[in-house]
Amino acid sequence: MLAACSGVQSALNPAGGDSQHLYRLTVVMTVGGTLIFIGVTVLLLYAIYAPPERRAWLGTRRTIIYGGLAFPITTLSLLLPYGLIVMRDTDAPSPDALQIEVVGEQYWWRVRYPAEGGRPDFATANEVVLPVGRPVSFTLTAADVIHSFWIPNLGGKVDMIPGRANRLSFTAERTGVYRGVCAEFCGDQHARMAFDVIVLDPAEFDAWRAAQASGAQAPETPFLERGRTLFRTGGCGNCHAVRGTEADGQFGPDLTHVGSRRTIGAGQFPNNVGTLAGWIANTQHIKPGVRMPSYGMLSGEDLRAVAGYLESLK
Amino acid sequence: MTRRRFWQVFMMLCGFIIWAVQFTLIYGATSTTCALEVAETRLLGIGIVPAVIAAVTLAAFLCTAGVLTYALREHRRLQSGNAGVTDIFLSQAAILISAFSIAAIVWQGLPALILPACA
């Protein structure tokens, strides 16, 4: 069971300063609460079962004053400033933070990196990439219902509310792949609304950012070209954008570099031609209630062509 | 109610009253300065919000400590004499309430002092 606490989606495996603070607070509260619970239980059993002459001290004024008043007041007086200092030191905005905007939608994540220092803005989906060691500031909102943004390994959770922009700041201090989730029930597919968080070295992050800001690459084979044609004629571009092509839909996730993402379906399946094809053909079977209809009418070969084209968008 | 009894009840409730006044003043001051966007104003290098909170909390603490001291003395005096049950009860309640109020006043002032005023 403890092995599960060291994974990519665990508040017990902190990978940043904020999550480390929260982890320590959790340990202090849990261990302290457990010890006090055990102590009170032992005293209770002693009061019930010990001989009257031996348990008499439990009812004295001194015991009540020290155990019932002084101890809890002292404990709370120590815990309160500790908790307040943790609260002050977490989620603290930094002026040079990397800005990222995330919009929660049923049941996926729209992610946008605003322009910064001459580097253009771009949109992606269901994946957040961060540079290690640099403060990050998220602006969080929702397009439809209330969602909640939570990356357990990196920080606390923050509600995403339609019409309101909430903020979350933290610094990732360990490279690696983590997993974020929606932490507020938002509909039937709430449990299938996750995203990947990839923490890279600064140089790798800059390279990733430059690649994401560029337009989609052209198909390299006739088969992939056929996929692109099917993507266009099938109306996919009405909902999805593929920058550098005529597809400019804003309703669904931006697919300009969908092939570079680790997963599809908001963190549900590894990203490859097979899962892409399965997703396109059976969205409503795999994730009932999502806005994208199933394209089961495509022939096997057409499906492979479209999936191949999407997978080629690195 | 006699004048003496009124005074006893008033002293018993003093801790609660001071606590309530401190709450109203520090959160009222914080909310008002945040709404007027003057919470970051500094006088002689000290932020006006923390200064007001510290001053009000210190004043409330000292007042309540004074009430507690008075209540303890009164309780000792009553115990050594021929006091009635009601007098003893009221003095004990005054001790307990003022002691709890001191803790509450400190706990209440801490968040306002440690956390940013308008976060």
Image: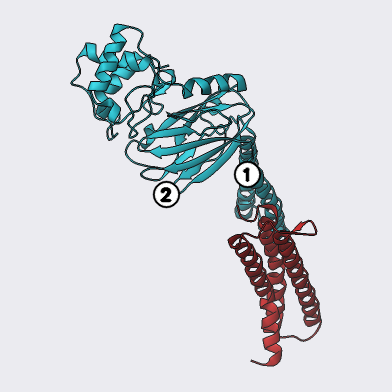
> How many C-alpha atoms fall within 10 Å of the one at disc 2: few (<14), some, or many (≥20)?
few
Q: Residue at x 38, y 25 (%)?
A: A268
For this rendering, which residue is in front, B60 or A306?
A: A306
Identify the hue of chain A. cyan
Q: Residue at x 69, y 76 (%)?
A: B14
Name the chain under label 2.
A
Residue of label 1: A29
**Which quadrant of the view contains residue B75?**
bottom right
x, y percentage for residue B65? 77, 70
Q: How is the image coloured?
A: by chain
Q: Is residue A50 left or right of residue A122?
A: right
Question: Which residue is painted at 37% across and 15% down in the image?
Answer: A311
What residue occupies the far top of the structure in this picture? A221
Where B32 sits versus A72, above or below?
below
Chain that is red in the image:
B
Residue B34 placement, left or right of A217: right
Residue, disc 2: A163
Amino acid at circle 2 = Gly
Mark yes or no: residue A274 visible: no
Q: Nearer the viewer, mark 1 or mark 2?
A: 2
Quadrant in the picture for the C terminus of chain A: top left
The answer for how far apart the CA atoms under marks 1 and 2 are is 35 Å
Protein chain holding label 1 = A
Task: Name the amino acid type tagged 1.
Answer: Met
Whether residue A128 appears in this view of the structure is yes
Q: Secondary structure at mark 1?
A: helix
Q: Residue furthest front?
A: A118
